[in-house]
Amino acid sequence: MTIDIFREFGDSVESDSEDEFLLRQIDPTRLPTHIAIIMDGNGRWAARRNQPRVSGHRAGAEAVRATVETAARLGISYLTLYAFSTENWKRPRLEVDALMGLLREFLRKEIRSLKRNNIRFQTIGRERGLETSVSREIDRARKETANNNGMVLTVALNYSGRSEIAEACRTLAVEFLAQGRDPAEISEGDIERHLFTRDLPDPDLLVRTSGEMRVSNFLLWQIAYSEIYVTDILWPDFRRINLFEAILGYQKRERRYGDVKPAPNGSLIAANVK
Ligand code: FPP
């Protein structure tokens, strides 16, 4: 079932605005099922304003709120946000504490809105190592939204793509040996079933803000065939118009998954030459 995206945005889209112009171009039947976002540029946003990095993160939390709301209204099924990598522990203590505090605050403040919008909240990454107060808030949000069947909002926290794959392989090898099976027979499907994302489809669209052309150890296995969209917008400035642009960019791509597009006459010769 496709939703009427105009109705979803109701009066909040002014006629003749750029929002309306972009929204009209989005094909609701070809929305990405899963959007993953590397939220980058908080520090630079703050530096440009001569403010401490933490204020960039605070403004970034507002962009998170706006993006979650827009994605849910558009009818996106899965939204995954990279909030904190295992490498981010190397940052100054003050900044790490501020990021954890912002996450706690986001969950406390937004839980009502998540419930109202039928959003199911979950995290991926190692819970071990997180402060108890953060784990408690995550647990509460997860439990209170567990029965929601709208958009799944996944926050990657204390996450590393390489560790996730290595951990899956270790667990599998132990399991195989315990069952007397040959670990040489471990398949891609076996690995997938042991990733944090085992219940999520792979992202169709990976968005990265602030213009950097890197994947930064995010969902390394899962983005094998994702379309990558990089925008120069710094994360704290990212608003619904930017998500519309990313989706439109995605809808212009032709996804081939390693295959080729057959020529109209059925031959494969020069089929991909435009
Ligand atoms: C990257 O910007 C951003 C992060 C490491 C943290 C992202 C966190 C938030 C958006 C706020 C809280 C999150 C939630 C889910 C409520 P950077 O600091 O690396 O920026 P820079 O590259 O410009 O220095």
Image (spheres, helix red, strand yellow):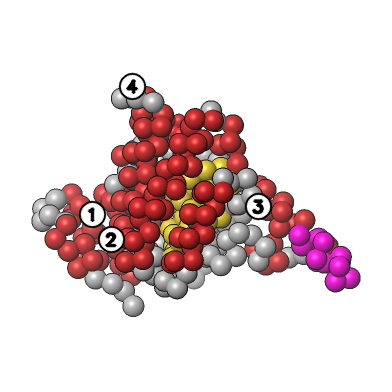
Q: What type is the residue that disc 1 sits on?
A: Leu
In the image, 12 versus 262, the foreground residue is 12
Split into quadrants, the picture shows ligand 1 in the one at top left
> Can residue 221 be seen from the camera position used here?
yes
Real-space CA distance between mark 2 and mark 4, rounded to the nearest whole angstrom: 37 Å
Real-space CA distance between mark 1 and mark 4, rounded to the nearest whole angstrom: 33 Å
Q: What type is the residue that disc 3 sits on?
A: Glu
In the image, 243 versus 230, the foreground residue is 243
**What kind of element bears circle 1?**
helix
Residue 153 sits above or below residue 264 on the image: above
Real-space CA distance between mark 3 and mark 4, rounded to the nearest whole angstrom: 37 Å
**What kind of element bears circle 2?**
loop
Q: Earlier in the sequence, mark 1 or mark 4?
A: 1
* Residue at image coords 36%, 38%: 58
Residue highlighted by disc 1: 22
Residue 219 locus on image (x, y percent): 57, 52
Specify the segment rendered in magenta: 171-180
Residue 128 locus on image (x, y percent): 64, 49
* Residue at image coords 26%, 49%: 241
Q: Which mark is residue 26?
A: 2
Residue highlighted by disc 4: 50
Residue highlighted by disc 3: 164
Q: What type is the residue that disc 2 sits on?
A: Ile
Q: Residue furthest left?
A: 15
Q: Quick one: label 1, few (<14), some, or many (20+) residues within 10 Å? A: some
Q: Quadrant of residue 9?
A: bottom left
